[in-house]
Image (spheres, grey):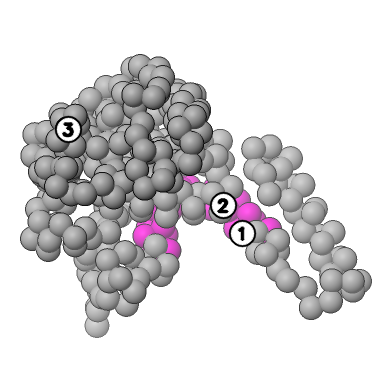
Amino acid sequence: MKLQTQIPLFPEEHNQIDYNSKTLLFGSCFSENMSEKLQYFKFQNYQNPFGILFHPKAIETLIEHVIQHKIYSEKDVFFHNEQWHCFDAHSKLSDATKEGLIDKLNSQIECTRNQLKNASHIIITLGTAWVYNYIEKNKTVANCHKIPQKKFTKTILTVEEIRDSLKHILAQIRGVNAHATIIFTVSPVRHIKDGFVENTQSKSHLLTAIHQVLASRTYYFPSYEIMMDELRDYRFYAEDMIHPNSTAINYIWEKFQLVWISNKTLKIMKEVDVVQKGIQHRPFNPNSEAHSKFLENLEDKKNRLQLQFPDIMF
């Protein structure tokens, strides 16, 4: 008896991720889940320089500013609730001082420029098509920073607006990095605060627009569909019944590995996993001879991996 519908997935024949790849991730909180997996297995990985960005316009603005060498200044930041914020960035970049925030923003722009030029794989996760426009400046924001909602208008991006935004993103990336593999995905996190029907409408707009821009070296990975169809059970959600729990994240990660990571690389990942678990091990008797030998073996495993892949750092 078959008790689960499964999405047919097959390994990509070209451009899979290995330990020489440089991955760059933009987008919603699910992109951070995937980045944590890449980080754990010690891939070369850089993610969300401006923090979580939920909608395509926010990602488009960031990439545009990176390409145009934007320099942030006092006019780009504001003070609210005892912190300095920027409408282009998530609150994780917010700072107690104006200078501190501006320095962070400009530092991340510079770092992202280098990452964008050298990335072998760029993964873009879209969370929602709903956007907030700050009325006073007529500006679509990446984050509202808890400013009262009456100061914003809320609208849903049309399929055409999302498609044009994604085309602009791709054109900008290709202008500085013609060879990167670009992977789009839609976050499995349900934005229920927008409303149940509104969330479904939002995801459908994102999915339709993505499939209108797929082309050479541009792909779609079905994170959203895996959650909705293969993990159709609340036991795969966190306590808020909105975010995927660790079991679901691990499951989607395994599916991602199937498609995007080669068998040869999977063998190295297993070796990295052994070292990572060894580092996390807490000995019963740290002064024992057995533990001393364990540490020696662990160090030997680290050295062998780092000789083969110098970019791996434990």
Query: Is residue 25 visible in this depiction of the protein?
Result: no
Mark 1–mark 2 distance (CA, rounded to whole Å): 7 Å
Q: Which residue is mark 3?
A: 136
Q: Position of residue 303 (x, y in %)?
A: 77, 47
Query: Mark 2: which amino acid?
Result: Phe
Q: Confirm or deny contact between disc 1 and disc 2 (CB under 8 A).
A: yes
Task: Tell me the residue at 41%/38% (across/down).
Answer: 84
| Circle 2 SS class | loop
Q: Which mark is residue 273?
A: 1
Q: CA distance from mark 1 to mark 3?
A: 51 Å
Total marks shown come to: 3
- Residue 217 magenta-highlighted: no
Kindly identify the amino acid type of the residue bearing the numbered disc 3.
Glu
SS for callout 3: loop
Q: x and y percent of residue 254 in the render? A: 42, 59
User: Disc 1 on helix, strand or loop?
Assistant: helix
Q: Residue at x 42, y 55 (%)?
A: 33
Amino acid carrying mark 1 in the image? Asp
- Whether residue 57 is visible to the viewer of this picture, yes or no, is yes
Residue furthest out toward the front: 82
Bounds of the magenta span? 250-275
